[in-house]
């Protein structure tokens, strides 16, 4: 069963590498091949082909449930149900919405934002909205979160927002009795009502019902650094713990009643399965809990039927069931981390002579999972927590045997005995506050986390066998040789540029600007995109992941062109996350804590045979803040780039008068995102770019780039590319000639190109 399941998984994985899904005739040919394999009883090949066919059919069905392009940007009346727990802050509520009725052919599930709602939003409510939608679209950058992939895995066919006119109408506040989401909402409301909204209440919600939306970003960062993220949401270990506790209690109590007509083992097994399933339902049946419930069902069925089961076969059945239910689960990091963690524990602990004591067993499991999951941590997150074994040695028993049981008791008693719930919460609060202090101290330790460039996939071909060797039974000689097989992970470096070349990446930060320029030994960042809230900005979500993916450890110069949010918003997160040698900006007062230098025309320097020159602002400055943007020209023998910030006609005219033919550049970053107040014809004629790259957001509210501006680009015979349509755009001036390519044409998958 294990080999067949792995072949099925391989078929599913193959499909996820495709830039486009195969046509119907290829699907038919695959079905014929599968039929021939079944006829010839070539079972292993059949399972691989079944994985391919099932993944393709699933993807086709899900992609067919997307918003038609003709319905983008128009008002559409719709009725439906709030599908899950909403995310709310002071400005907006975000929630999944299951469409029940609409005048148009809409996807079955959409994600909506409601700005400044006048009514409290809760899961299970029935609403009538007027919405404005767009097709699934997200920023596409190397190393960063692929929002379009996430929307695909969640089955969301459109995103948009609720119009406040006409006014939304609450049709019903009574959820269906069987609604899991409504039940979770009821628990959250009661906890908040009885216990308030403290830091510990947020953790109780996470541990009891899998809702981590109230946990602040600072706490998630500590959990990430200490490798304890898996403990702060409902995971397979929590479900196993609760099921085991129920099994033990029911077994003893039922045996004590002496009702022999029902064997105690069978009653206990069924009770444990019910308890584990209910607890998984509280978490919304996430991938880790799906795997845990399937494995629990197999183990308990073996007890009921009095059959022996092999742990790896049980894990294989769970894996096969999850893939049948949703093959897109393989696109989630949680899928790989959860299954691999269980497999490693079975491999490292199971089938060994002698049974270790509790402390020895916990240490061994922590060591095994830390070693085994480190390659995946590098692949998915570009970092490894060095203190994870120690942190988990402390946190696992505290969370498993104290925090989780007490949190569940709080949830139960808050409905039946509110006074007792308050006393129990006092205990939970003390436990969680103590654990938080320990984890916070560990996270602050020097070298608690190692950041490293994302390794290529081929390095896993060495790392995985290395894990098996290192965790082999003690009788195997030279297990330390497995460590050598980890070396490709550690010594993988990004391609080094030639001495007189450079690479510029215009990142896709929506309606904003951020570019990274790399020479052979230096890095410059020009602008940092927007800040959306205290927990979300483009520096954190796009720039830092990209720099880590590139193996960048230090920024030599950060240039902030001017003070608009869409250019400076991510600066603080970037400066906090990576060492930066110099900050150059036209608004030094906004970055006073980082010893900034005011940019001015005439500043210049050379890195590795590449010349950097600031062309503007002039002294004295312009009236408009946009016109005072730092303008940077980059020149080498291989090509040139002109970064213009948000300058408009006045500054462009001054640049033409001051520099004339010296403005000629191969690649121009469109001024002010392609607004009609910029890119005047005389400026474009002086620059004479071969390419114009436009940093604009998808279907942005300003209508950038303006059609009249695009017409001017065509008039000067420049090829223009927009990050909204192409994702990140790469300019390589490192070989014989300058080359431009885009993320969507070189690295996208079928969910990005539909």
Image: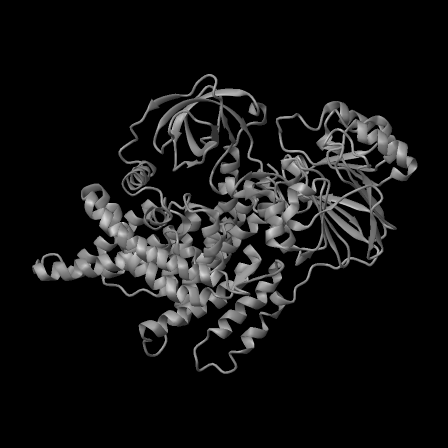
Q: Quadrant of the N terminus?
A: bottom left
Could you say which quadrant of the image residue 679 lies in?
top right
Height in image: 360 above or below 47? below
Residue in the picture at 39% in, 37% down: 84
Q: Residue furthest top?
A: 166
Q: Position of residue 341 (x, y in %)?
A: 43, 62
Relative horizontal placement of residue 245, taking residue 98 as reference (left or right): left
Q: Residue furthest left?
A: 258
Q: Position of residue 338 (x, y in %)?
A: 43, 57
Residue in the picture at 33% in, 61% down: 398
Relative horizontal placement of residue 612, taking residue 162 as reference (left or right): right
**Residue 298 seen in the figure:** no
The number of numbered discs placed on residues in the rendered structure image is 0
Q: Nearer the viewer, residue 431 or 337?
A: 431
**Residue 716 seen in the figure:** yes
Relative horizontal placement of residue 564, taking residue 643 as reference (left or right): left
Q: How is the image coloured?
A: one colour
Residue in the picture at 62% in, 29% down: 700
Relative horizontal placement of residue 24, taking residue 262 as reference (left or right): right
Q: Nearer the viewer, residue 150 or 57?
A: 150
Q: Position of residue 541 (x, y in %)?
A: 57, 46
Height in image: 650 above or below 458? above
Q: Position of residue 168 (x, y in %)?
A: 42, 21
Q: Quadrant of the C terminus?
A: top right
């Amino acid at each position: 069963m294990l080999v067949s399941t792995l072949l099925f998984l391989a078929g599913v994985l193959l499909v996820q590498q495709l830039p486009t899904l195969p046509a119907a005739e290829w699907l038919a040919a695959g079905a014929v091949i599968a039929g021939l394999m079944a006829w010839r009883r070539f079972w292993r090949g059949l399972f691989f082909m079944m994985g391919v066919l099932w993944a393709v059919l699933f993807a086709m069905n899900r992609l067919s449930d997307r918003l038609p392009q003709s319905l983008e940007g128009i008002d559409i009346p719709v009725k439906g149900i709030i599908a899950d727990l909403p995310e709310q802050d002071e400005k907006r509520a975000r929630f999944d919405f299951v469409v029940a009725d609409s005048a148009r052919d809409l996807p079955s599930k959409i994600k909506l934002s409601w700005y400044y709602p006048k009514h409290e939003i809760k899961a299970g409510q029935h609403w009538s909205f007027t919405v404005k939608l767009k097709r699934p679209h997200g920023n596409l950058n190397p190393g960063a979160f692929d929002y379009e992939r996430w929307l695909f895995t969640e089955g969301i066919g459109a995103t948009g927002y609720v119009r406040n006119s006409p006014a939304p109408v609450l049709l019903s506040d009574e959820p269906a009795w069987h609604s899991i989401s409504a039940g979770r909402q009821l628990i959250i409301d009661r906890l908040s009502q009885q216990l308030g909204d403290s830091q510990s209440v947020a953790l109780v919600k996470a541990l009891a019902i899998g809702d981590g939306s109230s946990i602040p970003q600072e706490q998630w960062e500590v959990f990430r650094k200490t490798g304890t993220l898996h403990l702060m949401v409902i995971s397979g270990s929590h479900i196993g713990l609760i099921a085991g506790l129920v099994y033990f209690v029911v077994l003893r109590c039922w045996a004590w009643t002496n009702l022999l007509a029902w064997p105690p083992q069978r009653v206990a097994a069924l009770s444990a399965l019910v308890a584990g399933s209910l607890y998984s339902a509280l978490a919304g049946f996430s991938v880790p809990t799906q795997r845990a419930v399937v494995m629990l069902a197999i183990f308990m069925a073996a007890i009921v039927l009095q059959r022996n089961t092999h742990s790896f076969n049980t894990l294989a059945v769970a894996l096969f069931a999850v893939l049948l239910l949703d093959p897109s689960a393989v696109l989630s990091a949680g899928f790989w981390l959860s299954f691999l963690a269980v497999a490693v524990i079975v491999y490292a602990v199971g089938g060994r002579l002698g049974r270790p004591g509790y402390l020895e067993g916990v240490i061994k499991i922590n060591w095994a999972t830390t070693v085994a999951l480190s390659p995946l941590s590098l692949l998915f997150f570009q970092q490894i927590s060095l203190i994870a074994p120690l942190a988990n040695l402390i946190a696992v028993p505290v969370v498993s045997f104290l925090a989780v049981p007490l949190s569940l008791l709080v949830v139960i008693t808050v409905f039946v005995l509110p006074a007792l719930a308050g006393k129990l919460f006092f205990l939970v609060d003390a436990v969680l506050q103590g654990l938080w202090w320990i984890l916070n101290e560990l996270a602050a330790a020097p070298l608690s986390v190692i950041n490293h460039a994302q390794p290529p996939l081929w390095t896993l071909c060495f790392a995985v066998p290395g894990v098996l060797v290192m965790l082999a039974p003690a009788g195997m000689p030279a297990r330390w040789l497995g460590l050598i097989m980890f070396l490709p992970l550690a010594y993988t470096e990004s391609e080094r540029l030639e001495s007189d070349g450079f690479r510029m990446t215009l990142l896709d930060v929506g309606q904003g600007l951020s570019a990274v320029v790399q020479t052979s030994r230096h890095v410059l960042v020009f602008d940092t995109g927007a800040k959306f809230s205290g927990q979300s900005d483009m520096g954190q979500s796009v720039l830092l992941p990209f720099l880590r993916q590139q193996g960048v450890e230090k920024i030599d110069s950060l240039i902030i062109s001017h003070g608009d949010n869409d250019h400076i918003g991510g600066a603080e997160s970037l400066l906090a996350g990576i060492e930066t040698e110099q900050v150059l900006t036209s608004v030094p007062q906004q970055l006073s804590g980082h010893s900034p230098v005011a940019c001015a025309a005439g500043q210049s320097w050379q890195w590795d045979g590449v010349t950097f020159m600031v062309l503007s602002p002039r002294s004295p400055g312009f009236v408009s803040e946009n016109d005072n943007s730092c303008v940077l020209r980059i020149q080498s023998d291989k090509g040139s780039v002109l970064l213009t910030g948000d300058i408009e006609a006045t500054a462009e005219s001054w640049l033409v008068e001051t520099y004339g033919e010296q403005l000629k550049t191969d690649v121009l970053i469109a001024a002010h995102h392609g607004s009609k107040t910029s890119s005047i014809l005389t400026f474009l004629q002086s620059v004479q770019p071969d390419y114009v790259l436009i940093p604009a957001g998808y279907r942005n509210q300003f209508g950038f780039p303006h059609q009249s501006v695009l017409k001017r680009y065509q008039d000067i015979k420049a090829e223009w590319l927009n990050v909204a349509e192409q994702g990140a755009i790469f300019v390589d001036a490192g070989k014989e000639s300058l080359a431009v390519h885009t993320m969507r044409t070189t690295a996208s998958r079928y969910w990005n190109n539909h």
